Image (tube, helix red, strand yellow):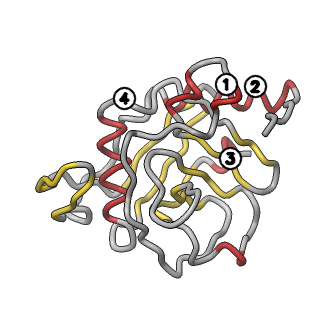
């Protein structure tokens, strides 16, 4: 599949979003919401708890709040990858106006666009499907089928995508910074 050509404003937006991922590891308020025994890649007892994160970009901050009751495995994975700086320098390789923006592919750190969207952390996660509506600002794990998510995630930029509700692991929502998303 040939990559889509992007306009200069879209490319600038991608670059700005790349910058925000390079400092993704700054997490806000801690709580006990994500304190669970979770098996991802290796079985460990996860004793850190976060309610959300602030994603810093060159054009502003995006604050997210985790849906810890709905997707503890995805949240744990997101936090662990962030702590390892896995997301540093990854690009938003899909920017689809009024639909979604997607990132988290380690292969997008390079310049070979034919690889964008194909990278993983080397493992997959179980699905954590829920009835959380697919509305603007929702963060969900990207998949290519059942139980295939890993590191890639997307943020909904459409007002609503009801046909996608219940089909993805939704793990967070934007609570501040919608103007940055735009």
Kind of element beneath mark 3? strand
Kind of element beneath mark 2? helix
Q: Does 128 sit left or right of 30 as displayed?
A: right
Q: CA distance from mark 4 to mark 2?
A: 22 Å
Q: Is residue 138 above or below residue 20?
A: below
Marks 3 and 4, the one that precedes in the sequence = 4
Farthest-out residue, bottom: 131
Q: CA distance from mark 1 to mark 3?
A: 13 Å
Marks 1 and 4, the one that precedes in the sequence = 1
Q: Which mark is residue 101?
A: 3
Q: Residues within 10 Å of mark 1 (few under 14, many from 20)?
A: some
Marks 4 and 2, the one that precedes in the sequence = 2
Residue plotted at (72% across, 71% down)? 161
Residue beneath disc 2: 12
Kind of element beneath mark 1? helix
Q: CA distance from mark 2 to mark 1?
A: 5 Å
Residue beneath disc 1: 15
């Amino acid at each position: 599949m040939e990559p889509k050509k992007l306009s200069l404003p879209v490319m600038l937006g991608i670059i700005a979003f790349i910058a925000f991922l390079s400092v993704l590891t700054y997490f806000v308020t801690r709580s006990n919401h994500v304190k669970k025994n979770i098996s991802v890649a290796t079985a460990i007892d996860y004793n850190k708890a976060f309610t959300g994160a602030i994603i810093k970009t060159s054009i502003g901050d995006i604050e997210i709040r985790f849906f810890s009751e709905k997707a503890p495995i995805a949240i744990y994975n997101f936090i662990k990858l962030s702590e390892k700086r896995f997301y540093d320098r990854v690009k938003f390789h899909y920017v689809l106006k009024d639909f979604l923006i997607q990132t988290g592919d380690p292969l997008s750190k390079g310049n070979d666009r034919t690889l964008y969207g194909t990278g993983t952390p080397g493992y997959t996660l179980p699905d954590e499907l829920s009835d959380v509506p697919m509305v603007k600002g929702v963060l969900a794990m990207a998949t290519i089928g059942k139980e295939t998510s890993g590191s890639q995630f997307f943020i909904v930029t459409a007002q609503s995508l009801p046909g996608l509700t219940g089909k993805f692991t939704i793990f967070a929502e934007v609570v501040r910074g919608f103007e940055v998303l735009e």
